[in-house]
Amino acid sequence: MSDGFDPRRARLADWLTAAWGIALFAALRADWFERPEGGVSAWEAFGFVDLWLLLTAILAVAVPLVAAARRAPAVPLAVIVVTVTVALLALVMVLYRLVDEPGINAEVDLGAGAWIGALCTLGVFVSAAHAVRDERSPGLEPVPEVPVAPAPPKGA
C-alpha cells in the first residue's frame, strides 16, 4: 500500500534516528582504540560488533525512508521497533567495549571514535524509542469513521 514517497509522513524523531545512524556509520571509520602502533577503527578492532553497529546504522537510516514511503503505519512501526531492539543490543556491546578494550588493557587506550560511536549508538536508541512512543501520523489521510448500527430492539 505505498502511494509514493512523501517526506511529510516521517516525524522529527524518525529523521533524528537517521541522522544518528549516519553519524554512527561515519564513527565506525574513526579510531576507536589507540595502541602504540597507531589508531584502530571499529572495522579493524571488532569481528562481530562492527557488523552489528553497521546493521544499527542501516536500520536507523531506513526508519524515515520507510515511514515516508508507506501510507499505513504498520510497516514503519515494525522497522522502528526492530531498530530500537538492535540499537539497545548495540549500546550494550559498545558500553562493554568501553569498559573492556580488546587486547591487553595496559597497551590499549580508548580513542575519540569509541566515545563518538557510543554517543551515536545512544542517539539511535533514544530517538528510535521516542519515535515508537510518538503516535502521530503526519501526512496520512484520516481513517474514515465507521457507521455504528443501532442496537436491535428488545425481544427481537
Image: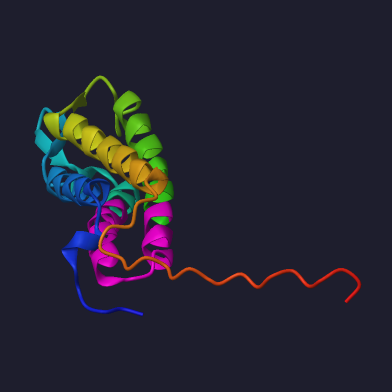
Confirm whether residue 90 shows in the render. no
Q: Quadrant of the N terminus?
A: bottom left
Q: Quadrant of the C terminus?
A: bottom right
Can you name the residue that lies furthest to the left here?
38
Q: Is residue 85 left or right of residue 156?
A: left
**Image quarter of residue 41:** top left
Residue at x 19% of width, y 73% of height: 5
Can you name the residue that lies furthest to the top here?
106
Confirm whether residue 147 shows in the render. yes
Q: Position of residue 89 (x, y in %)?
A: 42, 43
Residue at x 42% of width, y 68% of height: 143
Q: Is residue 112 above or below residue 21?
A: above
**Residue 80 part of the magenta-drawn span:** yes
Q: Is residue 2 above or below residue 28?
A: below
Tell me which secondary structure the magenta stretch mostly adopts: helix
Q: Position of residue 140 (x, y in %)?
A: 30, 65
Question: What range of the chain is rendered magenta?
Answer: 54-81
Q: Is residue 54 left or right of residue 25?
A: right
Closer to the camera in the image, 133 or 129: 133
Can you name the residue that lies furthest to the right here?
155
**Residue 59 part of the magenta-drawn span:** yes
Count all numbered tags in the image, as a single digit. 0
Q: Is residue 12 left or right of residue 144?
A: left
Closer to the camera in the image, 123 or 151: 151
Q: How is the image coloured?
A: rainbow
Residue at x 20% of width, y 51% of height: 15
Q: Position of residue 123 (x, y in %)?
A: 26, 38
